[in-house]
Amino acid sequence: MARGRRGLQFYQREKKINSALLKDIFEIIIGTFVAVFLAVAITYFIGMRTGVIGDSMEPELYNGQEILINRFIYKLSSPGRNDVVVFLPNGNQKTHYYVKRVIGLPGETVQIIGGKVYINGELLEEDERFDKMADAGIAENEVVLGDNEYFVLGDNRNSSEDSRSGNIGAVSGSNIIGKAWFRFKTDMGEMGLVE
């Protein structure tokens, strides 16, 4: 009889190990499914994917690089200085998305003097990665931003069509699609958050 119990106990232990293993596998499958579902839902409802056109945002973003746009963030807050935003110039639905960095905020005065940016008459301290601008464009004179207007520049300042251009000018907050959030890897750039 002792022999029969030992065999039965071995069988029960074997069954517990298998059910624990099956439970772990099931949890991994469910966890993966939930993660994929959340990623798709977040991308669909909050984010949007687009490509960068041109070299105006180099070295941060490269021509042809894919980025993920957070369309939800500016429903809760306003764009801040140095945010990289995606917008349609003058709300034109027939053009491509522009990707630029916010320099001037609503109510501020922006002017470019000697290739440098001045906000409300004071020099804007900027990273050395931004070139001195050869052309001030319309910002040669003071540009006064309205209640919901932003002054944007490309990081590659001498190869950028931005708020200095008369056909773009100040960007209305209502034309901003969202914040450039994540960049995908290319031959020239690494994958990661947009800074």
Image: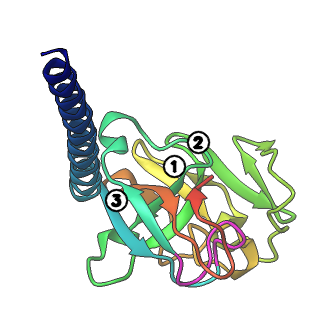
Lateral position of residue 156 relative to residue 52, left or right: right
Identify the disc placed on residue 108.
Answer: 2
The numbered mark, 1 or 3, whose residue comes first in the sequence reads 1
Q: Nearer the viewer, residue 107 or 1?
A: 1
Q: Mark 1–mark 3 contact, CB under 8 Å?
A: no
Can residue 88 be seen here? The reply is: no
Classify mark 3: helix, strand or loop.
Answer: strand
Q: Amino acid at mark 1?
A: Leu
Question: Can you tell which of label 2 and label 3 is closer to the viewer?
Answer: 3
Q: Position of residue 88 (x, y in %)?
A: 37, 70
Q: Position of residue 8 (x, y in %)?
A: 14, 25
Q: Position of residue 117 (x, y in %)?
A: 76, 55
- The relative height of residue 170 versus residue 59 in the rendered view (above or below) is above
Q: Nearer the viewer, residue 20 or 89?
A: 20
Stretch of the chain drawn in magenta: 56-65
The numbered mark, 2 or 3, whose residue comes first in the sequence reads 2
Identify the disc placed on residue 177.
Answer: 3
Classify mark 1: helix, strand or loop.
Answer: loop
Q: Position of residue 194 (x, y in %)?
A: 58, 56
Identify the disc placed on residue 145.
Answer: 1
Q: Amino acid at mark 3?
A: Ile
Can residue 173 be seen here? The reply is: yes
185 within the magenta span:
no
The residue depicted at 69 percent of the width and 79 percent of the height is 188
The residue depicted at 65 percent of the width and 51 percent of the height is 110
62 within the magenta span:
yes
Q: Mark 1–mark 2 contact, CB under 8 Å?
A: yes
Classify mark 2: helix, strand or loop.
Answer: loop
In space, the residues marked 1 and 3 are separated at their CA atoms by 19 Å
Image quadrant of residue 114? bottom right
Q: Amino acid at mark 2?
A: Glu
